Image (cartoon, rainbow, N blue to C red):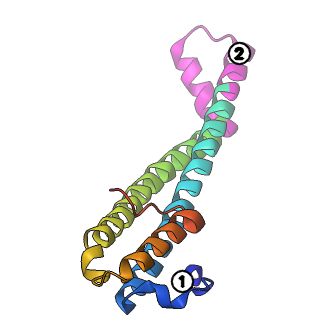
């Protein structure tokens, strides 16, 4: 909510509904960016765990030179480092999927509010003199918060 409070042009909002919608839009954009960042970093972490898992497998296979599958499986199961990294890889993969769902939901909520604001612009800025204020608000949102209200 602090995004609009820092804006010096308080009278250019139009109706009070516009201010509330813009503040909510900024909050949703911040939430979306946060989840996208977490999703990206957890994806990197998952790749690191997969790399460590492959290195442990390579070391285990080349060290033992096992000929039968039964002794191969028992040596893998007995290796606690392998099991620990496998567990971390699985958990991080589940976390990536969870964050991906959160990103999709946040993006949907953000886009719905953004489109509602664009569709209702004729209601929110009814007078001809307010259309200049609308242009100032749209320009500010694009420049300061990277929220495009010009096009759907």
Question: Does residue 75 belong to the magenta stretch?
Answer: yes
Residue 56 location, x and y as percent? 69, 28
Is 46 drawn above or below residue 66 in the view shown?
below
Judge whether residue 79 can be spotted in this image.
no
Left or right of 90 in this view: 121: left
Q: Secondary structure at mark 2?
A: helix
Residue 98 location, x and y as percent? 44, 55
Q: Secondary structure at mark 1?
A: loop
Most foreground residue, 97 or 1: 1
Most foreground residue, 65 or 128: 128
Residue 129 location, x and y as percent? 37, 83
Image quadrant occupied by the N terminus: bottom right
Judge whether residue 55 can be spotted in this image.
yes
Residue 19 - label = none
Magenta segment, prevailing SS (helix, strand or loop): helix
Residue 64 - label = 2
Question: Does residue 99 belong to the magenta stretch?
Answer: no
Is 146 drawn above or below residue 89 in the view shown?
below
The CA span between labels 1 and 2 is 60 Å
Neighbourhood count class around disc 1 (C-alpha, 10 Å): few under 14, some 14–19, many 20 upward? few
In the displayed image of the protein, which residue is found farthest to the front?
129
Please report the residue visible at 66 percent of the width from the left and 38 percent of the height from the top: 48
- Magenta part of the chain: 55-81
Left or right of 62 in this view: 108: left
Residue 1 - label = 1
Left or right of 42 in this view: 152: left
Q: Earlier in the sequence, mark 1 or mark 2?
A: 1
Total labels drawn: 2
């Amino acid at each position: 909510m602090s995004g609009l409070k820092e804006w010096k042009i308080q009278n250019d909002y139009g109706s009070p509904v516009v201010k509330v919608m813009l503040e909510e839009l900024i909050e949703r954009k911040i939430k979306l960016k946060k989840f996208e960042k977490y999703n990206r970093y957890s994806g990197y972490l998952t790749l690191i765990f997969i790399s460590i898992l492959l290195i442990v497998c390579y070391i285990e296979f080349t060290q033992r030179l096992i000929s039968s599958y039964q002794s191969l499986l028992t040596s893998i199961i007995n290796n606690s480092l392998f099991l620990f990294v496998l567990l971390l890889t699985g958990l991080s993969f589940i976390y990536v999927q969870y964050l991906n769902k959160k990103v999709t939901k946040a993006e949907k909520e953000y886009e719905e509010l953004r489109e509602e604001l664009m569709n209702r612009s004729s209601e929110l800025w009814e007078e001809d003199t307010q259309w200049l204020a609308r242009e100032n608000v749209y320009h500010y949102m694009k420049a300061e918060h990277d929220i495009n209200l010009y096009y759907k």
